[in-house]
Image (cartoon, rainbow, N blue to C red):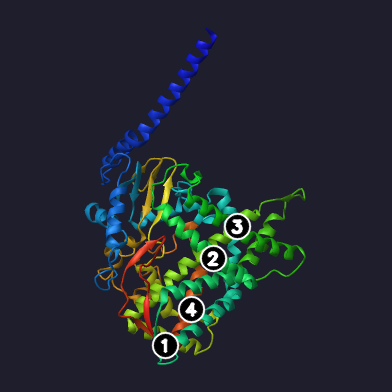
Amino acid sequence: METVTASSILISVVCIILVTGLIKVVNWVWFRPKKLEKCFRQQGLPGTSYQFLIGDMKDYASIRTQALENPMNGFSNDYVSRVDPLGHQHSTKFGTDYFVWAGPMPMISISKPELIREAFTKMQEFRKAKFNPVFDKLFPGLVSYEGEKWAKHRKIINPAFHMEKLKLMLPAFGDSCLEMINKWEMVVAETGSGELDAWLELTKLTADVISRAAFGSSYEEGQRIFELLKEQTDLALLMIHSLYIPGYRYIPTPKNRRFKRLEDQIHTSLRAIINKRKEEIEAGEAVKTDLLGILMDSNLKEIQQVDGNNKYQHLGMSITEVVEECKLFYLAGQETTSTLLVWTLILLSKHQNWQARAREEVLQMFGKNVPDFEGLNHLKTVIMILNEVLRLYPPAFQLSRMIYKDTTLGALSIPSGTMITFPIYSVHRNKEVWGDDALEFKPDRFSEGISNAARGNNAFFPFGWGPRICVGERFAMAETKMALSMILQRFSFELSPSYAHAPTSVIFLQPQHGAQIVLHRL
């Protein structure tokens, strides 16, 4: 009798658990999305109707695949329908602000500059999106942290990107650029002209710069790490574009096993470099002026803070956290700069007048000498050009934030569990903000600085905005100015007839079929 009673209780408990779980699942995939859809519409926010479980994901996948099948018909800066075809359709139908569905999760697209600034300022309410753990593995460290941990890491990392520290890294930038320039000289050696794929070349350049600037004399080891990161990124992109199922990453599929092996190899290699540097510092050797040296010195100072009782507070980063920040240096630093450089060369190939103006400024400032730090900071025309490239071809063409507790944005009430996306490409080509020529390449719109470029509006977000603005912005701009100046000193260039204009987003905005240019020796 007791056995029967125990069995009955167990069955009842199991049934309760199953029914409770079923209710939660049904609420997640149907009742809650429909409730949120009604909430948004009552506030006057337009959007798509929720479709059971899949939302708009099926439409997104099919229309994006179709959009990427062929390059654009001719050269145009109006590429949005290719890079984000579904977003383009929705914005045409609904306007600047609207909602769509990533499965059962609502996504609100916000393009009003004042709302973007408000969201980027309210860090506690608008947090980094955690929609796929694989993505977090690609971009660990500072960009994924929140609250006190973010503040601590930002404080430790900031010194590595101060202007005086970047000045010390400039020789590493110059060495990498000179190696690339010498290779390009060989391409034009026989006839004075030659063709190459600038996208491949600049990707190699920026990887080399990061390796040198981050690890100094250990940059050859750093290059091996970059190769592993590149393989891991390609694999992660395949995984990210699949429907995310919670816990799936723990299943030992071939992709998951390979991703884990790459992760272990990267961490092992980085740890070896970091531990070696740690031993050097502890032995009293001078702190090296590369990113790793400055970061570890800043971290050591943070660890050894003394409180009122003369006791050490261990406030710094662990070795694992230093490894993650180094990994972030690699991927974010390399991708941001290579995409900015390649679109700059492409646009200057199309606009020879601006290429000539930039070259004249560079030659007046440096002649044929290696550019110096002070001179690079006084290149007005070059800076105008780079800002215009960042406006038309922002590396991160869209930014996202997640709402974890009910909040407001402007007059909009936003419930917990909503993702907010900010299509930077849309803001940067808004004709009401930038004028009727918003789609045209006109660097002189920045002649009086960024604040006056968009009719007095703060609507320029290539590196984000507010407290979380990209910490590596100065690094990327210094590297880009150095590389562009050295190219302009020695070559003129134009697009090859084989170039096909095909912007696409692979984490960052890049040319899908490369950037074939024809070099001419000056």
Residue at the spot 38% in from the left edge and 55% down from the top edge = 116
Residue at the spot 24% in from the left edge and 70% down from the top edge = 73
Determine which residue is flagged by label 1. Answer: 360
- Report the Cα–Cα distance between label 3 and label 1: 45 Å
Mark 1 belongs to which amino acid? Glu
Question: Callout 3: 10 Å neighbours few (<14), some, many (20+)?
Answer: some
- Report the Cα–Cα distance between label 2 and label 1: 35 Å
Q: Earlier in the sequence, mark 2 or mark 1?
A: 2
Label 3 sits on a secondary structure element that is: helix
Question: Callout 1: 10 Å neighbours few (<14), some, many (20+)?
Answer: some
Determine which residue is flagged by label 3. Answer: 267
Task: Say whether residue 274 is left or right of residue 390.
Answer: right
Q: Earlier in the sequence, mark 1 or mark 4?
A: 1
Mark 2 belongs to which amino acid? Phe
- Report the Cα–Cα distance between label 2 and label 3: 12 Å
Q: Is the residue 34 above or below the residue 368 in the image?
A: above
Mark 3 belongs to which amino acid? His
Q: Is residue 455 visible?
A: no
Q: Residue furthest front?
A: 254
Q: Nearer the viewer, mark 2 or mark 1?
A: 2
Q: Which mark is residue 130?
A: none
- Report the Cα–Cα distance between label 4 and label 3: 30 Å
Q: Is residue 57 visible?
A: yes
Determine which residue is flagged by label 4. Answer: 483
Question: Callout 4: 10 Å neighbours few (<14), some, many (20+)?
Answer: many
Point out residue 412 in the picture as x, y percentages from the top left corner.
Answer: 34, 45
Q: Nearer the viewer, mark 4 or mark 3?
A: 3
Label 3 with label 1: CB-CB less than 8 Å: no
Label 2 with label 4: CB-CB less than 8 Å: no
Determine which residue is flagged by label 2. Answer: 226
Point out residue 293 in the picture as x, y percentages from the top left corner.
Answer: 65, 66
